[in-house]
Image (spheres, grey):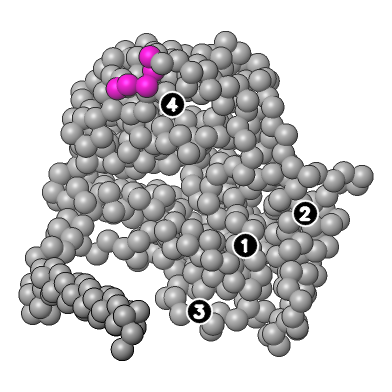
């Protein structure tokens, strides 16, 4: 055997031994790190979710974001703008980012400049002087404000009244605190006509009164309501307020859509009603107020004794918020405070910006066979999809509730994603939401006008439509509505140019 061949065999033998030893080491390592099946059962059993969180499942947002990523539909499900916020807001953040002194921890209960601005604004709006140090708290989104308000006041066995449909986190937050949710649904006075208004949905007075008792700790109010868009009237709020006072109940008022109220409706803050300041926590959102949902900044205001409880939850879970984001938001508030009564104020102009989008969506949905519920506030529109049921293959989806099957089918086959409203009801009342879908209309005009065309399989995929779509005049209606109603004569929009200063 030649020397070269001998060296090659030696090298090969050495490499084989090395690979074998690595495989053995890996196998031993896996054996060392993976417990036997019997032990794994014990580990899984011991380290399951704590009792307070038992039954928790991924939310509708987790599921539908994944669905959108996979199928890439026209996403009218999630509630955020698909265009930039006003430039003065992003300019403020750029200004703050260049300041080397604003990148460290700030005051735990709220950045000083921001709580001053919030206190100044709401002192004007509610007609009483707010103490920025003790009556205002900033949080990581309104989500945290809700969590802290509920956790800071609800004890084991306390009952909390939740008005349906509700933002889906209300129920689990109450349950995590050991509370017992008591649900009451807004129901339509009438279902006649091709369209409904969110004002048609009301609470039954007798039913509401029956829910209040000595165990009732709080009621969660959301006005304007998400997903319905209902703006509660003075009469409706007075009823709630009187029951709160009669039974010594806390009102947690989620008012994140406070600036999006369409004429002739008016947003009334329940904290301003007689005797309600002392028992109301009001929650707001920079994400909704300034169209910057990714900033995750919220706040709560109310009497100092109620705010103290929220502060305790906040300091021992989150502690403090993002300094640059809070500073930039303070600058934005200060700008708006100087023109609060002006049409240029973003708090006033955003509704005018949304009004035509709302009308376009209502027209489009109606023309394509839906029965829309026109909202009085917010930027969501629910619609009854059941007139289209004969043309939709719900059997292709396996979910329990029809609205989940409809929205998933639409996402996969039509390219249009909405949110199933049963996610916003307690189990007992979920059937009330099954016939509806929620769409978001705070989108670029070119999305609401032009991109509806691609919701048809006939125009997006070069394939023959499945047999059950043969009867779907729905698609033709979509194109017709998008062309004739959603795109004004002589106008083509290629994007959003949002440069308000």
Name the disc covering residue 397, or none. 3
Q: Is residue 253 left or right of residue 350?
A: left
Q: Secondary structure at mark 3?
A: loop
Query: Of residues 241 and 491, which is closer to you in this image?
Result: 491
Circle 2 residue? 450
Q: Secondary structure at mark 4?
A: helix
| Magenta-drawn stretch contains 103 | yes
Residue 249 in picture, x, y percent from top left: 25, 37
Q: CA distance from mark 1 to mark 2?
A: 14 Å
**Residue span colored magenta:** 101-105
Q: Residue at x 24, y 76 (%)?
A: 14
Q: CA distance from mark 1 to mark 3?
A: 17 Å
CA neighbours of label 2 inside 10 A, class few (<14), some (14 to 19), many (20+): some
Q: Secondary structure at mark 2?
A: loop
Mark nearer the N terminus (1 vs 2): 1
Name the disc covering residue 73, or none. 1
Eye-nearest disc, 1 or 3: 1
Label 1 close to label 2 by CB (< 8 Å): no
Q: Residue at x 51, y 73 (%)?
A: 405
CA neighbours of label 3 inside 10 A, class few (<14), some (14 to 19), many (20+): some
């Amino acid at each position: 055997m030649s020397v070269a061949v001998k060296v090659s065999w030696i090298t090969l033998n050495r490499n084989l031994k090395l690979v074998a030893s690595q495989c053995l080491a890996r196998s031993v390592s896996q054996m060392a790190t993976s417990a036997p099946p019997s032990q794994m059962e014990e580990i899984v059993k011991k380290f399951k979710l704590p009792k307070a969180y038992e039954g928790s499942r991924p939310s509708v947002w987790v599921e539908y974001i994944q669905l959108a990523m996979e199928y890439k539909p026209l996403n009218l499900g999630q509630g955020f703008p698909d265009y930039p916020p006003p430039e003065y807001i992003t300019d403020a953040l750029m200004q703050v980012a260049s300041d080397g002194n604003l990148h460290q921890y700030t005051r735990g209960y709220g950045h000083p400049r921001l709580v001053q601005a919030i206190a100044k604004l709401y002192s004007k709006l509610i007609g009483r002087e707010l103490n920025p140090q003790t009556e205002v708290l900033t949080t990581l989104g309104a989500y945290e404000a809700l969590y802290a308000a509920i956790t800071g006041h609800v004890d084991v066995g306390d009952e909390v009244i939740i008005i349906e449909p509700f933002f889906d986190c209300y129920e689990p937050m109450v349950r995590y605190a050991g509370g017992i949710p008591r649900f009451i649904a807004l129901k339509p006075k009438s279902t006649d006509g091709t369209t409904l208004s969110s004002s048609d949905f009301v609470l039954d007075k007798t039913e509401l009164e029956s829910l209040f008792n000595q165990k009732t700790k709080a009621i969660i109010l959301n006005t304007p309501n998400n997903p319905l868009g209902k703006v509660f009237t003075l009469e409706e709020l007075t009823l709630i307020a009187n029951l709160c006072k009669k039974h010594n109940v806390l009102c947690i008022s989620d008012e994140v859509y406070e600036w999006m109220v369409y004429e002739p409706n008016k947003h009334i803050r329940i904290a301003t009603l007689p005797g309600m300041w002392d028992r109301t926590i009001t929650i707001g959102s920079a994400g909704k107020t300034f169209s910057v949902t990714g900033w995750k900044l919220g706040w709560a205001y109310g009497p100092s004794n109620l705010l103290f409880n929220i502060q305790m939850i906040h300091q021992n879970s989150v502690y403090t918020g993002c300094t640059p984001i809070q500073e930039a938001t303070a600058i934005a508030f200060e700008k708006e405070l100087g023109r609060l009564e002006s049409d240029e104020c973003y708090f006033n102009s955003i509704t005018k910006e949304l009004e035509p989008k709302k009308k376009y969506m209502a027209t489009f949905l109606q023309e394509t066979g839906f029965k829309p519920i026109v909202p009085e506030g917010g930027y969501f529109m629910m619609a009854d999809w059941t007139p289209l049921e004969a043309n939709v293959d719900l059997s292709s989806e396996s979910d329990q509730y029809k609205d989940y099957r409809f929205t998933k089918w639409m996402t996969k086959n039509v390219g249009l994603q909405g949110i199933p409203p049963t996610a916003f009801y307690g189990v007992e009342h979920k059937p009330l939401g099954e016939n509806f879908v929620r769409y978001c209309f705070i989108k670029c005009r070119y999305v609401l006008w032009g991109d509806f065309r691609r919701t048809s399989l006939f125009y997006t995929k070069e394939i023959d439509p499945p047999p059950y779509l043969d009867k779907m005049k729905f698609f033709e209606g979509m194109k017709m509505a998008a062309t004739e109603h959603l795109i004004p004569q002589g106008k083509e929009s290629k994007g959003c140019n949002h440069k308000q200063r």
